[in-house]
Image (cartoon, rainbow, N blue to C red):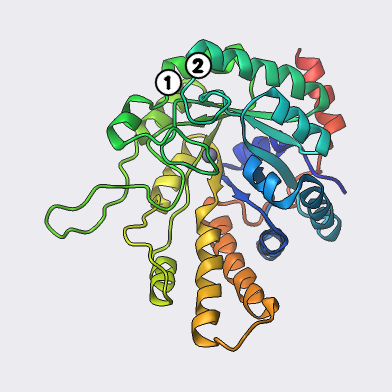
Amino acid sequence: MALVPMRQILDEAARGGYGVGAFNVNNMEQIQAIMEAAVETHSPVIIQASRGALQYSKLIYLKKLMEAAVEECPQIPVALHLDHGNGPEACRTAIELGFTSVMMDGSLDETGKVPNSYEQNVSVTRQVVELAHPFGVTVEGELGCLGGIEDGQGAGLSDSEMQEHLTDPVQAEDFVAKTGLDALAVAIGTSHGAYKSGIKDPKTGKILPPKLAMERIHQIHAKMPTCHMVMHGSSSVPQELVEMINKYGGRMPGAFGIPLPEIQDGIKHGVRKINVDTDSRLAMTAAIRKVFTEQPEKFDPRDYLRPAREMMKQVYVARMKTFGQAGHATDYRQMTLADMKEIYAAQA
Ligand SMILES: [Zn+2]
């Protein structure tokens, strides 16, 4: 079995009316935890690596780990996706490496920090579609800007700046038509990382959830019912994990994520891919801190990486159930990049 094109996973999710978590990975334990969760819940899954992750793990290691994952679990449809490609070259490298999907984030320039013009975004995204589709590889583009910084990605916008950079539904229709992309990342006020909100309840002083412009998703879905949307920065930042980190010597005051009901509302309105990175980082950190604090005599990495992997798996299982992908692993025959290449060729 081989990795499947992400487009098939999204098309099937649309048919079944569910969303699919796209989980970021840097190392073996994360990949194993995702696969264990997918097998347990019988879920198709998207595994993604950012450019930072590829630098950290080295390209070839990640590729071989992914090959091991699909070889061990042939019944699970798995797509391998490049998160926040910053130009055609990064996308080409990922395609050559065997990724079945790439994101061309043309909302920002190559530094990943400065917003591009709309025309620049259309042009570079179209270029990547022309590069990827002949290989059967899926393309995700982004319109509007996300807040926060993730592996150097994100304009680092303030709350009010973020409101100005939300995805415009009218422009979205034009963007999808002009680029021919497969999936559209929308900016609705989410941001990368563990600190998604600076808003405090004036009465209690408690941090409130970030204010999301869910109506943008509703409007885009009404205009383009078949467009697959992607929510970035969609970790929920479970408070029990933050508390556990803080209890065992960590310092993460005010960490707050996206409430799961908001994500489920998005899924009802065309969101098919939900990017989750921070939640597994929190799970891993919480589990390791607990071992270090309670058993300071331990020094075998397996003594803390095994519980870390287990805690990440629990987070993935919970997300797979919430997003609705659980139970759908064998609904369909897995396609290859060659199959998808023919479909794109027939459409062109
Ligand atoms: Zn992102």
Q: What residue is at 72 percent from the left and 52 percent from the top?
A: 57
Is 285 positioned to the left or the right of 298 in the image? left
Residue pictured at 62% horizontal, 19% vertical: 125
x, y percentage for residue 168? 40, 20
Q: Is residue 295 visible?
A: yes
Q: Secondary structure at mark 2?
A: helix
Query: In this rendering, is residue 223 above or below 270?
Result: above
Is residue 67 toward the left or the right of residue 212 in the image? Answer: right
Q: Label 2 neighbourhood size at 10 Å, few (<14), some (14-19), many (20+)?
A: some
Q: Is residue 47 visible to the viewer in this orientation of the structure?
A: no
Say the numbered circle drawn on residue 169. 1
Quadrant assignment, res 295: bottom right
164 vs 306, left or right, is left
How far is mark 1 from mark 2, CA to CA?
Answer: 7 Å
Q: Tell me the residue at 47%/52% (across/down).
A: 235
- Mark 2 Cβ inside 8 Å of ligand 1: no
Residue found at the very far left of the displayed protein: 203
Q: Secondary structure at mark 1?
A: helix
Residue 94 image label: none
**Label 1 CB-ligand 1 distance < 8 A:** no
**Looking at this view, is 73 or 66 the one in front?**
66
Q: Relative to 291, does residue 15 appear above or below in the rendering?
A: above
Give x and y (percent) for residue 188.
Answer: 40, 34
Q: Of residues 19 and 116, which is closer to you in this image?
A: 116
Q: Which residue is mark 2?
A: 173
Tag 1 near tag 2, CB within 8 Å: yes
Residue 156 on image: x %, y %: 41, 36
Identified by mark 1, the residue type is Pro
Crowding at label 1, few (<14), some or many (≥20) Cα neighbours within 10 Å? many
User: Looking at the image, which residue is at 73% across and 17% down?
Assistant: 130
Please, what is the three-letter code of the amino acid marked with disc 2?
A: Glu
Indicate the quadrant containing the C terminus: top left, top right, bottom left or bottom right: top right
